[in-house]
Amino acid sequence: MSTKPTHEQAQLHLQVYEQRREAKLRQARDWFFKNYHVTSIDDAMRIAPMMSEQGTFVSMVASYWEQACALLNYDLLHEDLFFETSGEFFGVWEMLKPVVPAFRERFVSKTFCANLEKAAQRYEKWIESRSPGHIAAMRDFMKQMRTQVAKAA
């Protein structure tokens, strides 16, 4: 986007950010990044079974970012402002990406995390045009984190 954010977009952006500060969502996000290192649906179900606190944490994180990305994808949020200040969604997508196809198939939900996926694809193009190599560096860092988690287990 080459335009500046409107006042309404900036206000909505701040509201989306404010929701991230909610205590339970903060706890869920912290748990998610420390623990949700999965490569299969079996890993996902073992680490965060449905109806468990961990499953609720995954659901909270995924649904928060799915909603925020839907606002972006419907142009209610300003793309540049969102991408400049909200990179966490991309990390969430990268962590969910290995299991999304299996979840979509198992629960017959082709739209599961579709807004998050679309926003992540947009972000890749956006950031690579401004900072080439960033995505590769981020993926390498996340791979190192997964390796450290695996060694500690």
Image (cartoon, helix red, strand yellow):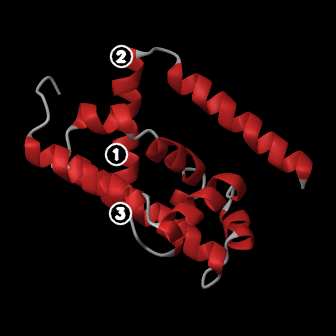
Mark 1 vs mark 2: which is more N-terminal?
Answer: 1
Mark 3 vs mark 2: which is more N-terminal?
Answer: 3
Image coords of residue 96 (percent x, y)? 56, 54
Residues 54 and 23: in front is 23
Q: Which mark is residue 111?
A: 3
Image coords of residue 142 (percent x, y)? 67, 37
Rate crowding at label 1 as few (under 14), some (14 to 19) or many (20 or more) other CA atoms within 10 Å: some
Measure the alpha-carbon separation of dots 3 and 2.
28 Å
- Secondary structure under the numbered disc 1 in the rendered image: helix
Q: Residue at x 42, y 65 (%)?
A: 63
- Secondary structure under the numbered disc 3 in the rendered image: loop
Residues 54 and 20: in front is 20
> Mark 1 sits on what residue?
118
Residues 64 and 93: in front is 64
Q: Are marks 1 and 2 in contact (CB under 8 Å)?
A: no
**Apparent side of residue 10 relative to residue 90 in the rendered image (left or right):** left
> Mark 2 sits on what residue?
129
Amino acid at dot 3: Thr
Amino acid at dot 1: Lys
Q: Are marks 3 and 2 in contact (CB under 8 Å)?
A: no
Image coords of residue 110 (percent x, y)? 38, 64
- Secondary structure under the numbered disc 2 in the rendered image: helix
Rate crowding at label 2 as few (under 14), some (14 to 19) or many (20 or more) other CA atoms within 10 Å: few
